[in-house]
Image: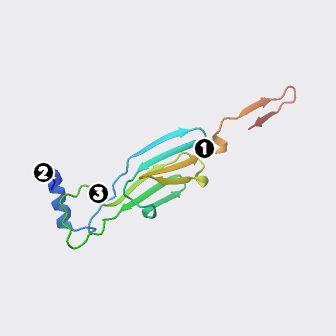
């Protein structure tokens, strides 16, 4: 048996028991990392304990929304919960993506509790060389 002496956690637990499971839940944020890797923008979200079918990814214009739901584990009648610290319910995160990203070609991968999104940098945002014509008065753009 585990013993815990955190009065605030105990207050949260009692409040959750009084409200009942699923009667009140607010979306919780999920931790993430974001970085550029070559010609891609990578965003990694930590959502352990969530099955892939409980994850929803939407893009509307430049707003990326990730929602995940951690559902309670079905318990047998003879199981008595001694300690419950893992949060249940809906987790969500919204990110405004720059116009320089190609939101039409986002790739998603979920492995070991980490959701990784790879968003390509749009062609129009990549550096390009501009050649100068001599005497012709026009400039050419080469990719």
On the rendered image, what quadrant is the N terminus found in?
bottom left
Q: Please, is residue 92 above or below residue 131 in the view?
A: below
Looking at marks 3 and 2 on the same chain, the residue that comes earlier in the sequence is marked by: 2
* Secondary structure of residue under mark 1: loop
Is there a contact, CB below 8 Å, between mark 1 and mark 2?
A: no
Q: Earlier in the sequence, mark 1 or mark 2?
A: 2
Q: Is residue 41 left or right of residue 8?
A: right
Question: Residue at 30% of width from left, 69% of height from top?
Answer: 74
Residue at image mark 1: 121
Q: Which disc, if any, is residue 87?
A: 3
| 33 horizontally vs 75: left or right | right
- Depth check: 114 or 43 in front? 114
Name the quadrant of the C terminus.
top right
User: How far apart are the two marked residues, 1 and 3, measured between alpha carbons?
Assistant: 35 Å
The residue that label 2 is drawn on is: 7
From the viewer's perspective, tell me whether residue 69 is left or right of residue 15.
Answer: right
């Amino acid at each position: 048996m585990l013993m815990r002496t955190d009065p605030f956690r105990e207050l949260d637990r009692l409040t959750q028991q009084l409200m009942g499971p699923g009667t009140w839940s607010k979306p919780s944020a999920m931790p993430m990392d974001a970085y550029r890797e070559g010609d891609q923008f990578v965003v990694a979200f930590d959502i352990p304990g969530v099955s892939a079918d409980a994850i929803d990814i939407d893009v509307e214009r430049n707003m990326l929304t990730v929602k995940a739901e951690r559902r309670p584990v079905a318990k047998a009648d003879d199981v008595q919960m001694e300690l419950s610290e893992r949060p249940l319910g809906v987790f969500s995160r919204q990110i405004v993506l720059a116009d320089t990203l190609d939101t039409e070609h986002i790739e998603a991968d979920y492995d070991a509790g980490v959701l990784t999104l790879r968003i390509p940098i749009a062609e129009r945002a990549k550096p390009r060389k501009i050649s100068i014509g001599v005497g012709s008065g026009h400039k050419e753009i080469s990719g």
